[in-house]
Image (tube, grey):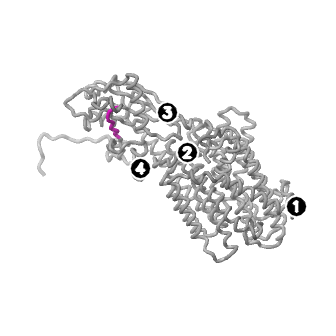
Amino acid sequence: MSSKHIDMKKVSFAGLLITLGIIYGDIGTSPLYVMGAVISGVPVSELLIIGAISCVIWTLTLATTVKYILITLRADNNGEGGILSLFSLVKRQKKWLIVVAIIGGAMMIADGIITPSITVSSAIDALKIYNADIPTIPIVIFILLGLFFVQRFGTAFIGKSFGPIMVIWFSMLGILGFIQILDMPIVLKAFNPYYAFEVLKENPKGLAILGAIFLCTTGAEALYSDLGHCGRKNIQVSWIFVKTCLVLNYLGQGAFLLHHVGDVYTKSVFYSIMPPWFLPAGIVISTLASIVASQALISGSFTLVSEGISLNIFPKLTVEYPSNIKGQLYIPLVNTFLLIGCIAVVLYFQDPLKMEAAYGLAITFTMLMTTILLFFYMKMKKINPIFTYGVTILFASLESIFMLANFSKIWHGGYITLTIAFIIIFLNWVWVRASRIKGRHAQYVKLQHYDDQLASLSNDLTYPKYATHLVYLTKSKVEDEVEKGILYSILQKQPKRADYYWLINIQVDEDPFRMDYHVNTLIKEDLIRVTFYLGFRVQQRISVFLRYVVTDMLEKGELKFKEKYHFMKESNGVGDFQFIYLEDVLSYESKDKFIEKFILSFQIAVKKLTASPEKWFGLDTSVVKAEKVPLIIRPITGISLNRLDKPRLN
């Protein structure tokens, strides 16, 4: 089922079904492993079980229902959500907020590696109920290989079944839990928050319990990230059903464990509450739900990186659109990175219970970063200061406590998450820092000083015509200024005669799907500047956009070709285009400043692994030419050479 023809702003049965299939996979599969993590290696006690479930209920209520469902979903960016969407709204308030966005985004991608690993492993681990020696690792890896392989073809064909699968999954959770509650209703005491405080106070491993409890809300960030796909009202209404089923299942698992007080229970609690006759069907449904959860995190990672590319936080990677469904995209390099990461995590940890140590740490960072950005959003909207500061202090304190709890598990696997996130953060930092260094040292010149030279070259028939339209990308936001390297390329390196010279400037807008442009004719019938204002979720298909602009200007009589083409009238052609892309190279004529040279060298090296300009901007490779331009960081000064009137013999 697709949201293509459904108004997701309104609550409808179809909208609710789509919402269930898209955003609840991660948080919905948490019953697979949460209670197992709570009782891992410790004897079961009534206080431990009731207290832990009380923690789960109130964590879901505060961290998910109140923070995300009631508050954060209202911080939408023209209907879009997610940490980078929120950052694009508040980035002008404080420059350092980009650090917050980078950390949160990196941790979400790390979560995108851990989630498929732990959910699929937890589901398949149930096969050991039939045979403790069955090798589950190869099965998990086979499923992951298949899941990542189909990404390149688009997931519309399997996405249609996600909604019904999750309806079955949540219904199963609720029914199984309800049956167990009827047998041990004392577990309902868990609704009293007193037991949550009591278990943390009395248990010497209180932090460890909190670290396990936090796993119940790890998918809360996905509720916000997929706001644009599902709509706030559909998420809020469907959450009532989802939370009810989740709470029933946690209570049911607790009721079952109360029959085993004093035991160190080593079997899967989730599968233990299933009747033996239902177990095969339960394993199949659980596996399907884990695939849905994994798909949600993979798609979310693609969207996050795509937004980061537009915001110049990530390098320009190749982005493909395997289907016509809005928002569905595929990034080959990210897909490979996630696949390798997932397989490595599965092989390293082997046991899904050991993976949970690496799991919660990533999402606590992301949730805390979202809280910081949300604070600045509420200030920007001039929301009541008492509410703004109260909400921020409440959730920052709660998430800091959970973060502290998860820090206790760093040496048990949390360092894997930190390592993955650090690699991504380092790449982001280098990319942002290199862009700022280039911006600081960029040399711009006023075009008015070159008007006569450009007009003269354009009309000088002694030079062979290079192209009808010669196009350069400029980063200058001042309309009558341009990089010195562009004029050097046109006038000096190899004089390039063209009918029209085009300067294209792309400005990424906080409106996610904005598509506007402005035309400024700087030299009549010679030099034209076009500024595209594109949302951070719009693919920058400059070749297509520019041809649209040229065609529109031709129809309005704003362009006139100096040399008519015989096929123009028949084909409605607009002439040939040549795009010149200037590649920065480090100049050897610069003083040593190690850190800046290292950052720029690293960025240039990374660029070789990323999408070429023609792929990123949607250009025909036959009309793109790259020219290397020296990037002089700090020119060497103070050199004095003496000129001799005649050669001196040694």
- At horizontal 76% and vertical 70% (from top left) the residue drawn is 276
C-alpha distance separating marks 3 and 4: 24 Å
Q: Quadrant of residue 641?
A: top left
Q: Is label 1 in contact with label 2 (beta carbons under 8 Å)?
A: no
Taking 513 as reference, is 590 above or below it? below
Please, what is the three-letter code of the amino acid marked with disc 4? Lys
Q: Earlier in the sequence, mark 4 or mark 2?
A: 2
Magenta region, residue range: 574-580
Where's residue 572, x and y in %? 36, 31
Judged from this view, the residue extending furthest toward the front is 570
C-alpha distance separating marks 4 and 1: 61 Å
| Mark 3 neighbour class, 10 Å CA radius: few under 14, some 14 to 19, many 20 or more | many
Q: Which residue is mark 4?
A: 607
Please, what is the three-letter code of the amino acid marked with disc 3? Tyr
C-alpha distance separating marks 2 and 3: 23 Å
Q: Which residue is mark 2?
A: 325
State the SS at label 1: helix
Does residue 200 show up? no
Where's residue 290, x and y in %? 64, 60
Q: Earlier in the sequence, mark 3 or mark 1?
A: 1
Q: Which residue is mark 3?
A: 533
Please, what is the three-letter code of the amino acid marked with disc 2? Ile
C-alpha distance separating marks 3 and 1: 60 Å
Q: Earlier in the sequence, mark 2 or mark 3?
A: 2
- At horizontal 62% and vertical 59% (from top left) the residue drawn is 291
Where's residue 195, x and y in %? 84, 58
The mark lying in front, picked from 2 and 3, is 2
Q: Earlier in the sequence, mark 1 or mark 2?
A: 1
Q: Which residue is mark 1?
A: 185
- At horizontal 75% and vertical 36% (from top left) the residue drawn is 386
User: Is 433 positioned to the left or the right of 170 in the image?
Assistant: left
State the SS at label 4: helix
